[in-house]
Image: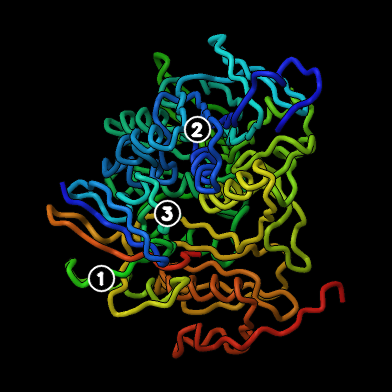
Amino acid sequence: MPSVTYISAAGSETAVAGFAGDSVMETAVRNGVPGIVAECGGSLSCATCHVFVCADSVFPPMEDLEDDMLDGTAVDREANSRLSCQLKLSDVDIRVTTPETQV
Amino acid sequence: MTGTGTSAHASQARGTLIIGACQAGVQLASSLRELGDTEPIVLVGEEPHAPYQRPPLSKAFLKGEATADSLTFRTHEFYSEHNIELVTRERIVSIERDATGGVATAESGRRFEFARLALTTGAVPRQIPFEGSELEGVSYLRTATDAALLEQRLATASDVVVVGGGFIGLEVAAGVRAAGKTVTVLEAAPRLVGRAVSEATSAFYLAAHRRRGTRVVLNAQVVRFLGQHDRVTGVELGSGDVIPSDVVLIGVGVIPRTELAEQLGLVIDNGVVVDASALCSDGLTVAAGDCANLPNPSLTPGGIPRLRLESVQNAVEQAKVAAATLLGLPAEYSTVPWFWSDQADLKLQIAGLSGGHDQIILRGDPETEKFSVLYYRAGQLIAADCVNRPLDFIAVRAMLHSGQHLPADRADDLSLPLKKLFLPAVPVLIGK
């Protein structure tokens, strides 16, 4: 089982065990990790599951709709910004930072 | 609360009882813990499942892409680690309370004592007593149990009738049509989704569903459901037409569940009446989500002062406010409401409440299936329906939050993204 570490904007770390195939967003929400809101439940409608992917974590490139939605996040996007509903876990450990706010 | 009176509940009652194990209920429980509450929390619901997301029931669930398990909000470990007692399959039927607490009793006889009480009782589908409503195949959709039954019925169906051209009905119709079945949507009003969007958006959805092969009948008057051997076989209309059907889905809105609030003597008016802090009329109980009638959280001049909001965002944000209120912390609910509906490959995102608009700007051509309808009142943008234009949606949502201005005379300029067209906030002269 991959471990997913969520680092808050203030720097505190929460690590939870994820399942391959689940998204980084689902894993956070099911375990009550603060910092990811995900109002639309992963249907690419709300841009409230924004994360910054740490340099040691790699995901496949994003599609256009995710790219578009990232322009509307509450905290401005950066080069490593992703919507965590689109990040599927494999068997590799992952680290992401959550923004100060999602809405 | 530290009761000093002689109430029967004062001595033993501790902690919070949340009635309704749903989106709002889970959020309320989580928020209490995030705010540092260490008292017991009991979250009680009548469904057999742990709380789950409802929006996918009319979309991914019916396509077999989601299950009640995959839609679960929180793991069982979450509830135990946060000392939240989740109780399923218990329907609360009676309740009493005073200023220090009270007791709720389930149908089974199980009693739940509490010092603090939250109602997240949700809503139930509005039922219309058509003749033949009891026939096998006549369906409603609200819970995962409903969705599983509907999925099972649809598997062998070839002719499906949807009564009600709102979001739920159209989402199901789109999925069923994509699966190759014959679908007819019957809407009593002269247009689709009349409660939520303007004529321009309604007209687009009518055309779009028809293009995809769904039959839509407006101004439809359902007379009765016809059946053979206790199974539904057709729907008879006022026009005399009979539309063959082996499954009928009725999606004509919901009614807030207020029975328990009524027992408590709370003020009810299309839902449990709450203030901006999610506090009910007794000044003690809180309510949140579909069951609550609340002050408009984004009131603009001309908007309606109170309403119910049936949305995930409202369930979540109002529940956060309710949790703070229960703990005696100051909190007021203010937000830009937003909604979404996925129908076939059409993504509708709505930002703001369009009630009271006096001008509509069309941004993009509906024929392209990518356009936005921008609603203005007195020159100020108040809401937008965005179809396959997520950038417009997020720009408008951000703009309504920040109070920036989007001049109506430039809003239809597709050569620039909306956010490039914003101007800084201008003072609004409320009441002038």
Indicate whether B250 appears above or below B229: below
Indicate whether B276 appears above or below B21: below
Q: Amino acid at mark 3?
A: Pro
* Figure quadrant of residue B377: bottom right
Indicate whether B114 appears above or below B206: above
Q: Are marks 1 and 3 on the same chain?
A: yes
Name the one closer to the observer, B270 or A53.
A53
Q: How is the image coloured?
A: rainbow
> Within 10 Å of the Cα at label 1, are there few (<14), some (14-19), or many (20+) other Cα atoms?
few
Q: Amino acid at mark 2?
A: Ala
Q: Secondary structure at mark 3?
A: loop
In the picture as drawn, the residue positioned furthest to the top comes out as B109
Instruction: Report if residue B209 is visible in the image.
Output: no
Name the one closer to the observer, B354 or B309.
B309
**Residue visible at 45% across and 28% down in the picture:** B86
Residue B287 position within the rendered picture, expressed as x and y whole percent measured from the top left: 66, 39
**Residue visible at 53% across and 10% down in the picture:** B108
Q: Secondary structure at mark 2?
A: loop
- Read off the residue under disc 1: A63
- Read off the residue under disc 2: B21
**Residue visible at 46% across and 28% down in the picture:** B85
Residues marked 3 and 2 touching at CB (< 8 Å): no
Residue A22 position within the rendered picture, expressed as x and y whole percent measured from the top left: 24, 49
In the picture as drawn, the residue positioned furthest to the right comes out as B432
